[in-house]
Amino acid sequence: MIALKTIESFLAPRELAFCGASRNPKKFGRVVYDTLKERGFKLYPVHPFTDEIAGDTCVKEIAELPDQVKRLYIVTGKDQTTEIVEQAAKKGIREIWIQQTSDTPESIEIAIKNDITLIHKQCIMKFAEPVSGIHKFHRSISKLFGNYPK
């Protein structure tokens, strides 16, 4: 299980690249994007097919991200995740969070091979403070059943 300290370290700067924000504000990736933005995160959206998400300018690929961006959050289809992790490794990104259901064995293997700190099988909404609504309930249930990171 991922250590809580690793999760807190990933979230503390409140700045990260974001792959998977939909143009449709009702899709999960966009809901996460909008929520993190509302919570004060500086986000750098990566999207190959649009120029902006929620008023933020997109880059088309990971290589175009500013050099100061050190963390990446991925909430894409599994068919895209491995390529995104490969691009992130080439860019020098060393901390990646892959949203639960987006990870693949190949993406995990690439992260390990490239000495990338990887968070996966966890929902970022359970940890990005202030946690509220269903995510707060989900966090409480995780703690109750002992599967919340320590």
Image: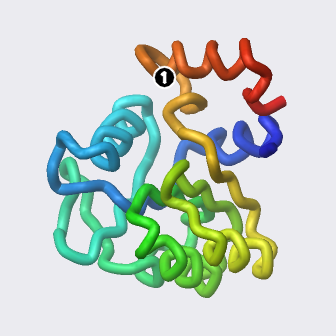
Q: Nearer the viewer, residue 113 or 45?
A: 113
Percent across and percent down for residue 145 are: 74, 18
Percent across and percent down for residue 38 are: 35, 31
The C terminus, quarter of image? top right
Q: Residue at x 79, y 22 (%)?
A: 146
Q: How many marks?
A: 1
Percent across and percent down for residue 26 are: 19, 40
Percent across and percent down for residue 134 are: 43, 18
Q: Tell me the colour scheme of the image.
A: rainbow
Where, by quadrant of the figure, is residue 140 drawn? top right
Crowding at mark 1 (Cα within 10 Å: few <14, some 14-19, many 20+): some
The answer to whether 113 is drawn above or below residue 6 in the figure is below
Q: Residue at x 60, y 20 (%)?
A: 139
Residue wearing tag 1 = 135
The N terminus, quarter of image? top right
Q: Residue at x 52, y 13 (%)?
A: 137
Q: Residue at x 36, y 33 (%)?
A: 35
Report the side of 122 relative to 46 (left or right): right
Q: Residue furthest bottom?
A: 90
Where, by quadrant of the figure, is residue 115 drawn? bottom right
Report the side of 25 relative to 68 (left or right): left
The answer to whether 81 is drawn above or below residue 22 in the figure is below
- Dot 1 falls on a residue whose secondary structure is helix
Report the side of 132 relative to 21 (left or right): right
Where, by quadrant of the figure, is residue 122 drawn? top right
The answer to whether 99 is drawn above or below residue 114 in the figure is above
Three-letter amino acid code at the position of disc 1: His
Report the side of 118 relative to 50 (left or right): right
